[in-house]
Amino acid sequence: MAPVHYPRLTHLALHVRNLDACLLFYRDFCGMTETHRRESGPQTIVWLAEPGREQDFVFVLMNGGEDLHLGERDYRHFGFALPSRAAVDALAEQARRAGCLLWPPRDEPFPVGYYCGVKDPNGNQVEFSFGQPLGPAAH
């Protein structure tokens, strides 16, 4: 019997209103770096990746979008793992100083763990967590 090959998630693409502000956010809060940029008429397309994961998964940011306005109970978000509770606390403090902290660090039962929420310049919610069974700290 031939092996089954399932699709693999490789990227997530977002149109954003302020490309430069979003690039700085994902660099400063998530440690992502620009790995590709191209211009196509008025369209700028930038790939961002975590160091060492450039061939695994990228965020694709494109100008020309509108700000995202999520409802109060809309918890859609991007999730990033951190190596410790102290790292979650430090990132939450960085976000508080920058005026983009959505919810302060909190503990939830397994598998959620310890996490905080931050809003990117386009209105996307980003969760930073420790203790989930995902990411490098889980291994």
Image: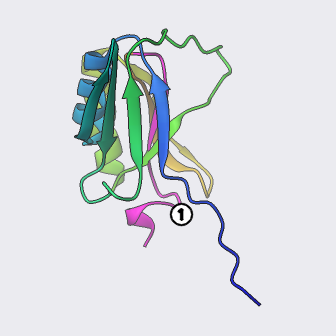
- Identify the residue position indicated by label 1 in the image: 133
| Amino acid type of the residue that numbered disc 1 sits on in the rendered structure | Pro
Asked if the magenta segment contains residue 120, the reply would be no
| Residue 105 appears in the picture as rendered | no
Label 1 secondary element? loop
On screen, residue 39 above or below 58: above
Question: Which quadrant is the N terminus positioned in?
Answer: bottom right
The one of 104 and 29 positioned closer to us in this rendering: 29
Quadrant in the rendering for residue 54: bottom left
Above or below residue 10? Residue 71 is: above
Residue at the extreme right of the image, as rendered: 1
Q: Picture coordinates of residue 76 (x, y %)?
A: 61, 31
Q: Say few, some or many: other residues with alpha carbon within 10 Å of mark 1 (under 14 / 14 to 19 / 20 or more).
A: some
Q: Where does residue 71 sit, x and y in percent of width and height?
A: 65, 13
Q: Residue at x 41, y 52 (%)?
A: 57
Q: Is residue 16 left or right of residue 34?
A: right
At horizontal 54% and vertical 53% (from top left) the residue drawn is: 9
From the image, which quarter does the C terminus lie in? bottom left
Magenta region, residue range: 122-139
User: Is residue 131 located in the magenta-colored stretch of the structure?
Assistant: yes
